[in-house]
Amino acid sequence: MPSKREIFIECGCKKLYCSKCEEIKPVNNFGLNGTYSSGETKYRSWCGDCSRKDNLKRHNENYRGLKARLASYRYTLKSYDLTEKSFCKLHKDQGGSCIICNKKLNNIFLDINDNHKVCVDHNHETGEVRGLLCNNCNTMLGQSLDNIKILKEGIKYLEERGSYGGDTLF
């Protein structure tokens, strides 16, 4: 058997070995992958059929993952007595942005290809939903234990020692 990347001639046709299906196929079944320093054409190691099957498999796996992520969001919303509809209304009422920093928050139910984490902020004592935050602002509140005194001391510290953030929001 020839070397895996060696082009060889069979019946007057240039052929290559596919490292996925382990079959020898005509070079026109392989995508181009640049050129070697010698100027020879470089071909992909998988044939077109194997590449298409792998792309379809990864697409289906990502779709299943997406469905699981949406189910997880629905479960999270349920714990705050929010429905998909009430979440969308809250998102719209906030102008689609984090209440604190104004960073754009994509609606997880309308823009399903987005991976940004949207956090439902709530009062930990009453469970009442306060709004939607970006992950950074939600983490800031959580780390400060929602304590206004701690947050004010943090502001005072930054004012005295310097802040690199400036006065502008995102």
Image (tube, rainbow, N blue to C red):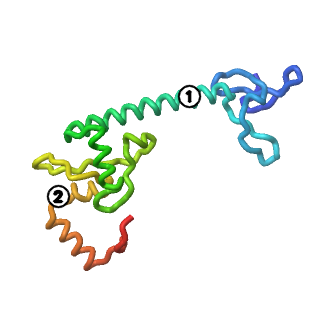
- Across and down, in percent, residue 87 comes to 29, 43
Q: Quadrant of residue 146?
A: bottom left
Identify residue for label 1.
56
**Looking at this view, is 73 or 83 the one in front?**
83
How many marks are shown on the rendered structure?
2
Above or below residue 108? Residue 62 is above
Identify residue for label 2.
146
Above or below residue 18? Residue 95 is below
Is residue 27 shown left or right of residue 59? right
- What residue is at 20 percent from the left and 52 percent from the top? 130
Question: Which amino acid type corresponds to the residue marked 2 in the rendered image?
Answer: Asp
Is residue 49 shown left or right of residue 155? right
- Across and down, in percent, residue 20 comes to 63, 26
Question: Which amino acid type corresponds to the residue marked 1 in the rendered image?
Answer: Leu
Looking at the rendered image, the quarter that the C terminus falls into is bottom left
N-terminal label among 2 and 1? 1
- Across and down, in percent, residue 85 comes to 30, 39
Q: Secondary structure at mark 2?
A: loop
- Asked if the residues shown at circle 2 and circle 1 are in contact, with their CB atoms under 8 angstroms apart, the answer is no
Above or below residue 165? Residue 33 is above
Please, which residue is most extreme toward the bottom here?
A: 160
